[in-house]
Amino acid sequence: MKLPETQLALLEAASATEPRRVAQLAEELGEDTAAVTRAAFELEAAGLLAVEERVTEDVTLTEEGDRYREAGLPELRLRAAAVEAGAGEDPAEMGRLIGAAGLEGPEVDIALSNLARKGYGEIEGGAVAVGENPRYDPDADPEAAALDAVAAGDVDSIDDGVLDRLEARGLVERTETTVRSLTLTDDGVTALMEGVEVTETVGAVTSELLTSGAFENVEFTEYNVEADAETVHGGKEHILRQTANRVKDVLVGMGFQEMEGPHADADFWINDCLFMPQDHPARTHWDRFALDVPPMAELPGDLIERVEDAHRNGVGEGDGYHSPWDEEFARAVALRGHTTSLSMRYLSGHAVGDLEPPQRYFSVEKVYRNDTLDPTHLLEFFQIEGWVMAEDLSVRDLMGTFTEFYEQFGITDIEFKPHYNPYTEPSFELFGRHPETGELIEIGNSGLFREEVLSPLGVDCDVMAWGLALERLLMLMYGFEDIRDVHGTLCDLDLLRNVEVVY
Ligand code: PHE
């Protein structure tokens, strides 16, 4: 019989009577564990070795756990200091005890909460009294004993509940590992007795093999595609980016073209063109990320005039705001709070020249808002902006477009609620039902642009428009409840690694 070198070495190192662990054999053979595991599975497939798998749990002390094992658990130190200070009779002042117990920083809170939990003492009005009937004997505290047991490698003696508690306190860490043990089978013994030779098989193609031409004469090792292998997490496009790309594909499929434009823009494009009065609350520093940069110099002069006139005097029947309007204020630069700034740049003809109806445009881009972080709000998010310019549009067209769009993502129960925007009339908010919680969540805002917006832009047909939140679409598609599952330091890596964005 002929076997590759590693397999033969492994066969010779294995025993028929005593199971031997892969890790130990790998060390003995000076090979890496993955190579030995691979060889073991090959030999198992050939019936020469038996592989037994056991999942074991490794428990180790964290740095904090180790510190408490040496110095004592904070609650025990506090208890000892209290007993010393005679707190069995009269409650002792907390500050003194903390000093005497040598507790520092977060240890103080840890000591106090665990002291109460274990009934070692009562805390009242800044003083500690030693408890009457503690839940444990302080000299035989099960958590302290368990720390010693973990350090000694005697984990089996520890009660499960105690181990759970230590883990919750961050004092121990548990990791699962698969341990594989190998035993020679009868066929394996027979093969060894009959004699096994080494085949010169090659595991990988090297450039040397290729250039020398030697690859033509060597035998390559067969792959075992069923063998267990280490999981490798390669780089991957973020779910948000994948979904954004999918949204773009869907909109292009619906006949839309993509808009582009600056993240930091003049307030003129972000707000003034949208008939947002300059004293609107959304335009204060509370909501908007102002940038300390020079005002935007290039703005179309005639458009500025018409926008100012719409604000001051109104358009058609409308009466305008008659409120102050300041050109310098309009030129100030901020991070855009919505991508409707892009729609203004395109509708005005400033971006790609004058547009004749019908037209459809979109963007899937980042916007920035000075919100308070919570499960559904971030300081920045992706907005799916879009608009359709045509003669005689109605709310039915708007609803039909959304129904068609969301259907592409399997969402068929969109609801509409009348809304107010300074720049659209009528306006609608969109809602979708969360697949896990059943709650209606807001997913977008939309409407038909008012005459006060369109007339200064020089558009004399209808324009329906919207801004939808990409992150909310994701919530409806994948069912997660907290936006921070996919963004930032708290994000769920398993979700990001495993989730599939399907078409
Ligand atoms: N700009 C609005 C928002 O950010 C969305 C919107 C765009 C509404 C265009 C109507 C028309 O919520």
Image: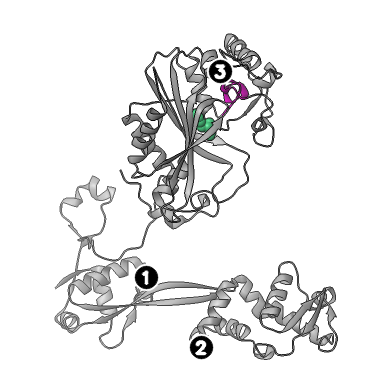
The residue at 31%/69% (across/down) is: 36
Q: Is residue 114 left or right of residue 481?
A: right
In this rendering, the answer to whether 436 lies above or below 94 is above
Label 3, label 2: how far apart the Cα atoms are: 78 Å
The residue at 54%/48% (across/down) is: 376
Comparing 381 with 481, the one in front is 481
- Label 2 beta carbon less than 8 Å to ligand 1: no
Q: Residue at the far front: name it.
A: 317
Label whose residue precedes the other's in the sequence (1 or 2): 1
- Amino acid type, mark 2: Ser
In this rendering, the answer to whether 345 lies above or below 120 is above
- Residues drawn in magenta: 264-276
- Amino acid type, mark 3: Glu
Q: Is residue 34 left or right of residue 77?
A: left
Name the secondary structure under disc 1.
loop
Comparing 340 with 153, the one in front is 340
Query: Can you tell which mark lies on residue 340?
Result: none
Q: Is residue 227 left or right of residue 270?
A: left
In this rendering, the answer to whether 243 lies above or below 363 is below
Q: Tell me the mark number nearer the camera, choosing from 1 and 2.
A: 2
- Look at mark 2 in the image and give the residue it sits on: 157
- Label 3 beta carbon less than 8 Å to ligand 1: no
Classify mark 3: residues with Cα within 10 Å, few (<14), some (14-19) or many (20+).
Answer: many
Classify mark 2: residues with Cα within 10 Å, few (<14), some (14-19) or many (20+).
Answer: few
- Look at mark 3 in the image and give the residue it sits on: 452
Query: Could you tell me residue 498's position as x and y percent?
Result: 38, 55
Name the secondary structure under disc 3.
helix
For the residues labelled 3 and 2, say whether their Cβ atoms are less than 8 Å apart: no
- Amino acid type, mark 1: Gly
Classify mark 1: residues with Cα within 10 Å, few (<14), some (14-19) or many (20+).
Answer: few
Total marks shown come to 3
